[in-house]
Amino acid sequence: MRTLLVLLLFLAQPFWEVKPPDTWSDAEIDTILQSSPWVATTRTEPAVRVYFATAAPIEQAEAQLRKRSKLPAPDPDYADFLNEHRDDAFVLAIPYPRVAGAGKADESKRMQDETEMKIGRKSYKLIGLFPPTPSDPVLRLVFPRAVKAADKTVEFKLYLASLPFPERDVSFFVKDLLYRGNLEM
């Protein structure tokens, strides 16, 4: 009976909790990158996918995808930033279909001024960004690592330059962002 209970608990957990990343199937990697708790889609059309680039399951899935598809390593400046600031910042990533126009100075400033994270009643400004490039069309927004496991939700107000209706909102339930017992963002 005890073995059956342990087996049922094992089967009830998501695959990323019980399987090592190198055993994830291509479909499982796609699930993590497209529809896991670390990924959300804005409601405003056109919908935009937003994900926590620095969450361990996302990083592990991307590493497996790069390994299997022989994709290039991440931008060295971005990798250096992560090595130096992993404990005090996290990165919210947005695949960006329109690289042209995303780097305009006035739009970039507006993005920095209007993009924020909200936890309860407290707001936090964007502390940096890595703009999309033709070889890596992903906008990476850097926020302070202020979210705690006891928080209920974390919300983001985004200004996404060069998109129609550039103001977007997205939120995540913090309790869903746990991975192997740790808050991952």
Image (cartoon, rainbow, N blue to C red):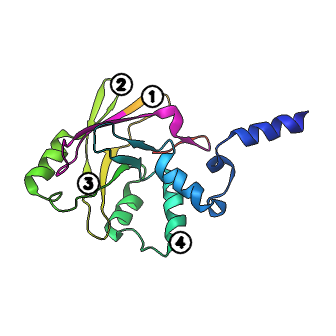
Task: Identify the residue shown where x is 45% and y is 27%.
Answer: 152
User: Which residue was labeled with disc 4?
Assistant: 67
Name which of mark 1 and mark 3 comes first in the sequence. 3
Task: Identify the residue shown where x is 26% and y is 69%.
Answer: 134
User: Which residue was labeled with disc 2?
Assistant: 120
Work out whether 134 lies above or below 111: below
Range of magenta residues: 155-180
Q: Name the amino acid type tagged 4.
A: Lys
Work out whether 153 lies above or below 80: above
Name which of mark 1 and mark 2 comes first in the sequence. 2
**Crowdedness of circle 3 by 10 Å Cα count: few (<14), some, many (20+)?**
some
Name which of mark 1 and mark 4 comes first in the sequence. 4
SS for callout 2: loop
Q: Distance between the residues labelled 3 and 2?
A: 23 Å
Q: Distance between the residues labelled 4 and 2?
A: 39 Å
Q: Is 175 left or right of 19, judged from the image as shown?
A: left
37 or 86, which lies in front? 37
User: Which residue was labeled with disc 3?
Assistant: 129
Q: Distance between the residues labelled 1 and 2?
A: 8 Å
Name which of mark 4 and mark 3 comes first in the sequence. 4
User: Which residue was labeled with disc 1?
Assistant: 151
Q: Distance between the residues labelled 1 and 3?
A: 24 Å
| Marker count (numbered) | 4
